[in-house]
Image (spheres, rainbow, N blue to C red):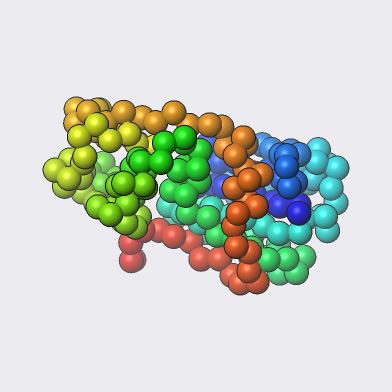
Amino acid sequence: MNTLFLDLAGNPGLVACVAEKEVRAAREADRRITDADLVPLLETLLQEAQWDLHGVERIACVTGPGGFTSLRVAAAFTNALAFALNVPVAGVHLSDLKNVQCAQEDLLWVHSTKKTELFVRGFGSYAKAFPEAAWMELGRLGERYPQGAPWTGELLPDHERFLSSWGAVRAEAKDAKEILPAFLGSLKYEEKNLVPWYGRKW
């Protein structure tokens, strides 16, 4: 099936037209992009993929974590487009996408959110200690960080140096475009509105 993929949470973000077995067109997107700028970007991608708008059969969107505005833009754009096209959607947590990009089964996903705060989630053997994506202070994570555990995600330089002092090593990751066809095919698509995931209650 033809899937439109939208990620404005990552750095950089990515918008792609993905068929069942290949990425037909893809462009990096600044996470500060506006919904007005998304429309011409989508038109360009559709032309490159040789699809028309009604050739989009489903939409997958990264719902968080990320910037407040970028997540709102991504979710609102996805919901509006899905309603107009009458197609199902799937919300993607950034940790799941980053995990699939790595070959290791046992690793931690970490994502900087503020100077002394980040989000963390465990996969494989680390899932028991960190079962769900959750906010944590950097010092507290340092106390609980498994010695030498590989990590994936997006960290501020200071956070990366801090984890390196605990023996943490960044896991090798494939380009997102390499894993998108299989990953998007594994998701559950529904007729619903997506809600941004900010990781905390405001």
Above or below 114: residue 162: above
Where residue 176 sits, quadrant-wise, is top right
Where residue 187 sits, quadrant-wise, is bottom right
Q: Is residue 110 visible?
A: no
Q: Is residue 94 left or right of residue 1?
A: left
Where residue 30 sits, quadrant-wise, is top right
Q: Is residue 132 visible?
A: yes
Identify the residue at image location x=63%, y=64%.
189
Q: Residue 8: give x, y in percent of width and height.
A: 55, 47
Identify the residue at image location x=47%, y=54%.
93
Identify the residue at image location x=59%, y=39%.
179
Identify the residue at image location x=44%, y=60%.
197
Q: Residue 41: give x, y in percent of width and height.
A: 71, 43
Name the image quarter holding the C terminus.
Answer: bottom left
- Nearest the eye: 13 or 104: 104
Name the image quarter holding the N terminus.
Answer: bottom right
- Nearest the eye: 66 or 33: 66
- Nearest the eye: 68 or 106: 106
In the orientation shown, which residue stands out farthest toward the bottom?
Answer: 192
Q: Is residue 60 left or right of residue 40?
A: left
Q: Residue 164: give x, y in percent of width and height.
A: 24, 28
Q: Is residue 186 left or right of residue 144?
A: right
Q: Residue 23: give x, y in percent of width and height.
A: 71, 39
Above or below 37: residue 176: above
Q: Is residue 137 left or right of residue 202?
A: left
In the orientation shown, which residue stands out farthest toward the left?
Answer: 143
